[in-house]
Amino acid sequence: MARYITITLDKRGVTCRARLLDDDAPRTCDAVWNALPQSGDAYHAKYARNEVYTLIPRITAAPHRENPTVTPIPGDVCLFDFEPWEIGNSAYGYEPGSEAHAEQGATDLAIFYGRNNLLLNGDVGWVPGNVFAAIEDGLPELAAACNDLWMRGVEGETMSFARA
């Protein structure tokens, strides 16, 4: 039986529903499912293009690579597992004390809302993400809200993931 999650941009009041890809990424799906609910500050990507994400405490049960991609498509929901040294660089702009600076590293839960994404970071190279869910309902509304984040800023916005 299919499992679903909701992803919400809380301040903007926009929610979508995504189906977990249990056949393609079973360990990642289980790790995320067991860690829900999660919520954190929303960020719009600098490098990847059409991505909005939140950083949460590291999900240590998540596999390092499972169903990976460096070219996510609209509707992909990805998990990135980061060691502390990978995203704590002050050039990335994360506030001291944020999940990016956690001693154990961080998990990045991300949605992709448009085309032509490329997960290439100038500091470290390719950054594959585990595709663990696909947005099935609400992508057009979410894309409009994400575009608004890009144009007007993310300050005060949070992103929440929950079981549906």
Image: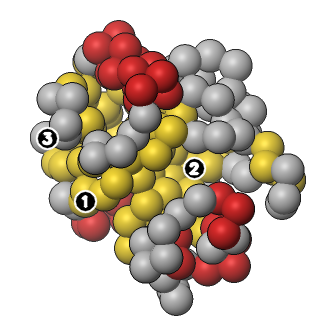
Which structural element holds mark 2? strand
In which image quadrant can residue 118 be found? top right
Q: CA distance from mark 1 to mark 3?
A: 13 Å
In which image quadrant can residue 87 be found? bottom right
In the rendered image, which residue does mark 3 sit on? 164
Q: Residue at x 38, y 65 (%)?
A: 56
Residue 38 is marked as 1
Query: In the rendering, at what x and y percent does residue 64 appear?
Result: 62, 66
Residue projecting furthest to the bottom? 103
21 relative to 89, above or below:
above
Q: Residue at x 53, y 34 (%)?
A: 51
- Residue flagged by tag 2: what amino acid is it? Asn
Q: CA distance from mark 2 to mark 3?
A: 20 Å
Quick check: can you spot residue 56?
yes
Q: Earlier in the sequence, mark 1 or mark 2?
A: 1
Query: In the rendering, at what x and y percent does residue 130 appear?
Result: 57, 49
Q: Residues within 10 Å of mark 1 (few under 14, many from 20)?
A: some
Q: Does residue 114 appear to the left or right of 134 in the view shown?
A: right
Q: Does residue 160 appear to the left or right of 97 in the view shown?
A: left
Number of numbered discs = 3
Circles 1, 3 touching at the beta carbon (< 8 Å): no
Residue 130 is marked as 2
- Residue flagged by tag 3: what amino acid is it? Ala
- Residue flagged by tag 1: what amino acid is it? Gln
| Quarter in which the C terminus is drawn | top left
Which structural element holds mark 3? loop
Which mark lies nearer to you, 1 or 2? 1
